[in-house]
Amino acid sequence: MENRIDIYAARQEGYCLKNDKIDDILFDEYGVNRGLRNIQGVGVLTGLTNISKVNGSKVVDGNKVPMEGELWYRGYRIQSLVQQIREEGFGFEKIAYLLLFGEMPTAAQQAEFSEVLHGASHLPTNFTRDVIMKAPSKDIMNSMTRSILTLASYDENANDLRLDNVIRQSIQLIAIFPMLAAYSYHAYNHIDNNQSMYIHRPDPELSIAENFLRMLRPDSQYTELEARALDIALILHMEHGGGNNSTFTTRVVTSSGSDTYSAIAAAMCSLKGPKHGGANIKVMQMMADLRQNVEDPLDEEQIRAYLEKILDRTAFDKAGLIYGMGHAVYSLSDPREVVFRNYVEELAKAKGRERDLQIYANVEKLAPQVIADKRKIYKGVSPNVDFYSGFVYDMLGIPMELYTPLFAVARIVGWSAHRIEELVGNSKIIRPAYKSVMEKLED
C-alpha cells in the first residue's frame, strides 16, 4: 500500500507540471541558449583553459567547415601521445602527470610520480568493510560517490584549499578510484547476485590498468594485450575540454570554494547521467537488439533497414537515436575512436570476436549514410569513442555495471586538473544569469 508521502507526491505532481513549464517561444524571445549551446549547437564560451583542446571545424574564407577531429592534451596531439605509449608500455601515469602539472615528465619525474601514486593506493583501515560493503548498490557510481564523500571524514585537512593540499587530495583520489570501482562492484555482486566476494589489493609494481584487471578478476590474471587496451581506453577518456558536463560541474563547485571531495562527488553525479557517461551502455544494448531483430546481422541491407527503423522511432528504445554516432563537437571523425579502433581490432582477433567486429564495422559504415538520408545532415556524422568502448569492455569481461565507473576512473584525472586550474586562475564564483519570466500576482 502506498504510504502518505507517495500519495501526496502523486497529487502534487500536477502543480509542478502547470507552474514549472516555460513556453519554448520565450527562450527565443530572450535569446537564451538552452544547455549553454547556441542555435548552431556550439557551446557558449564560459571560460578559458590551458589543459586540453577539442576541435571539429575550421574557418575557411570566413565560413565554418568540418574537419577531421582533433584532441590535444597540454599541447600534444592525442595520436602522438598514444603512439609514444604504444612504443614504451603503459601510459596512464605519464599522461596523468602531463594533465595535472602541464609538462611532459622526465624519466625521473615519471618514476617518482608513479611511486607516489601507487603508494597512495590504499584505503583507511576497515573502510572497505565499514563503508563499501555496507548497503551496496547495483549503481556503482552511487556507491563510489558515497565513498568519496565519506573519505572527507578521514581527512584532517579536507577543507584546506591550499594548492599543495588539493594536489595531495587529487593524487590520492586518482590512486584509489580503481579500488572504489572494483570493490563496490564485488560488494554488489556478492550481496545482490550471491556470488563470491573478492578483495585483491593493488600491486605497487603494476600499472593502473593492470591493477584494475587484477582486482576485478577472481584469478587476478590478464594478458598484456588486455591491459594495454584498457590503458589506452583510460587515456582516451581522461580529459575532453572544460565544457563537458561533469568537468564544468567540477569547475562550478570549485569556484564556490568547496572542498575537493564535494567537487569530485558532484562531478560523479553529473557523469552518471545517461546523456553523459552512459552512452557506451546504450550502444551495447542497441547492438544486442540488432542481433535479436536482424536475421543476418552481417547483411548490409538488413542492417540499413534496422537503422532506418531506429531513426523512425519504431525500433530499439524508440528514441530515434543511433547511439555511438555523432558528437557535439566532432563531425568528420572523433580522434579517440580513430586511435582506439586499432586496439579494438587486435583484441577482437585475439578473442575470436571477428564476427562481432564486422557487425560493428557495418553499422559504422551505414549509420552515417542513413542519418544523412533521413535527417538531411550533411556536415558529417561519424562514430564517437563510445561506439567501440563498450565492445572493448565486453571483450575484457568487464560487467556493464562498471562501464561508467571506468569512465570515472579515467576522468578523475581531468577533473583534478581543471579543479587545480580553477583554483589557480579564477577567484570568482561561477554564477550565470537566469531571466525571470514569473507572472506577478500582486503589486
Image (cartoon, helix red, strand yellow):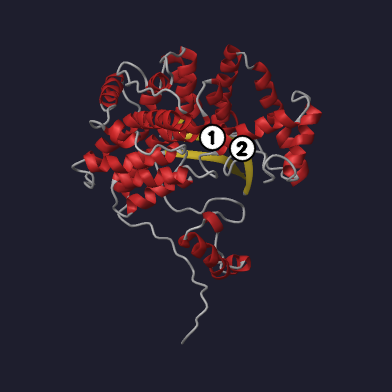
Classify residue 112 by image quadrant: top left
Label 1 sits on residue: 70
Disc 2 residue type?
Met
Asked if residue 430 shows in the view, the reply is yes
Question: Residue 367: where, in percent of width, then height?
Answer: 71, 35
Between 412 and 381, the residue placed more toward the observer is 412
In the rendered image, the residue lying farthest to the right is 301
Residue at 57% across, 20% down = 342
Marks 2 and 1 in Cβ contact (< 8 Å): yes
Please tell me whether residue 427 is drawn above or below residue 235 in the rendered image: below
Give SS at disc 2: strand
Classify residue 294 by image quadrant: top right
Give SS at disc 1: strand
> Viewed as shown, does residue 313 lie left or right of 163?
right
> Viewed as shown, does residue 221 lie left or right of 14?
left
Label 2 sits on residue: 67
Question: Residue 230: where, in percent of width, then height?
Answer: 47, 23
Please tell me whether residue 51 is drawn above or below residue 224 in the rendered image: below
Disc 1 residue type?
Glu
Question: Residue 378: where, in percent of width, then height?
Answer: 72, 42
Question: Residue 264: where, in percent of width, then height?
Answer: 36, 43
